[in-house]
Amino acid sequence: MDVSLELNNLNCQIEKHDNGDIVGFCIDDNCKEVNKFCCLNCFFDTHSQHKVVKLKELNTFIQGRYKIYKKTVEEEKEVFDAYKNNELMNAEKIQKFKKEMFEQIEKKIKTFLEELSNKYMNLNEKKLQDFTILKEYEDFFIGNAAPIQKIDLNKLSGICTNIYKVSLNNPTSSPLSNSDSEAASLSVNMKPMLNPVNTNTINPNNENQEKKNKLKKAINEINKEFDDYVKRQKTFFNNYLNSQFLNDELNFLSASSKFEWCRKTYNQHNFYYQLEKQNMKGTKISSNGTMTVLRAKEKLQNNYKYKIKFLVGMNYIGDFDLGIGTEKAADSCWLRNKESICISNTGILNLDINYDNSIKLKDNDIVEFEIITLDNRKSFKGSINDKLVFDLDFNLEDVFIMAAIRNTGNYIEVLEYDSSPL
């Protein structure tokens, strides 16, 4: 798109200037005219003594700014498209996660319902076994609907023997215990020869009530087991949701929102820093020449691994320390003491001992720390611009990540941060 000014078509709009060609543009701060375009007459009239640029220079300036604008729009579109594509991709991941989670829940519920069904089936399984032979007895007569003289007595004899054996082994659940049936009457009449269980001693009403009571008790036990299980699962799931699940906030300005520089004063000094970018960047804004500490909000936890990347802003020179230390180190207002380990503009210092004075912080350095806080060993690694510069063990307790800056205008910014339990 061409956004250049049509130089040949621009004429002065002031009547007494006779549509003179526009040759310049007034950029004077004291100019009160609404129309800043100038013809030759304007130079000696409305824009006398004003600062004016040639129209061609203005056009070149506008073209240059427009190119920057177009480039910015294109870059922002690329960023927006990248965010949008990532948003869709992450939405798909969340939907997949949701599907997998519900599939696992469905699988768990299905397994539990099968177990529950088996428990109820087991209550009646023995009775189904007891009456299997009687079903065979019934089927025999249905399948042999013929004169009684032609019945296969050998097969019938085997069936009846099995029925009788079941009666002996389990008289209370056997149909022979029913005094109202013909089979029970026959069993009693044949007592001298077969010597079965004496069913006359059994009260049918009491027996039925006892069966009902046992069944009710068994069902109540299963229901209680079920209710307790559901209660435990609900409690576990609610606790999980409240304590961990989807409970972390997203933060697009940094790899993590868990790290923050802290608003705190030490010793006799005030807080001389300005915090920006959700407390990820701290800039020294006052008391030039006085060294003061900027401390992380949270101290390092035991049995954790930390990775953190900083950008060092030292355009205004001056002392600059970056490392770890205790609150006592912070009270000393810098990190060159027995309560800290640091990289500085003068070298690396380990518990007040000059470890290596050949490695020094400079402006725009990218510093990375890896800190491991195992109970039996604590280690601290430091790199500058992807080069490992130290690897030290330490035994300090209650340790914080810290920086100490002397000159105003210098700053420390966290670019990446990650912490995970070991």
Image (cartoon, helix red, strand yellow):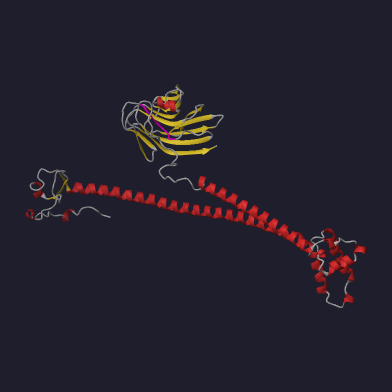
Which quarter shows the C terminus?
top right
Magenta residues, start to end: 291-297
Question: Where 35 sits versus 391, above or below?
Answer: below
Residue drawn 83% across and 73% down? 141
Kindly indicate the quadrant of the structure image that contains residue 186.
bottom right
Up the image or down, 121 lies above or below 239; here it is below
Q: Answer left or right for 96 relative to 415.
A: right
Q: Position of residue 108 (x, y in %)?
A: 61, 54
Vertical arrangement, residue 362 with respect to residue 32, above or below = above
Does residue 266 appear in the picture of this structure? yes
Q: Nearer the viewer, residue 416 or 129?
A: 129
Q: Is residue 118 visible?
A: no
Residue 58: percent from left, percent from top:
20, 47
Question: Residue 106 location, x and y as percent?
Answer: 59, 56
Q: Residue furthest left?
A: 16
Relative vertical location of residue 178 with respect to residue 26 in this rendering, above or below: below
Relative horizontal placement of residue 315, taking residue 183 as reference (left or right) = left
Position of 80 with respect to 61 (left or right) is: right
Indicate the position of residue 150 as horizontal and vertical percent values.
89, 76
Extreme residue in the bottom direction = 147
Residue nearest the observer in this picture, 271 or 304: 271
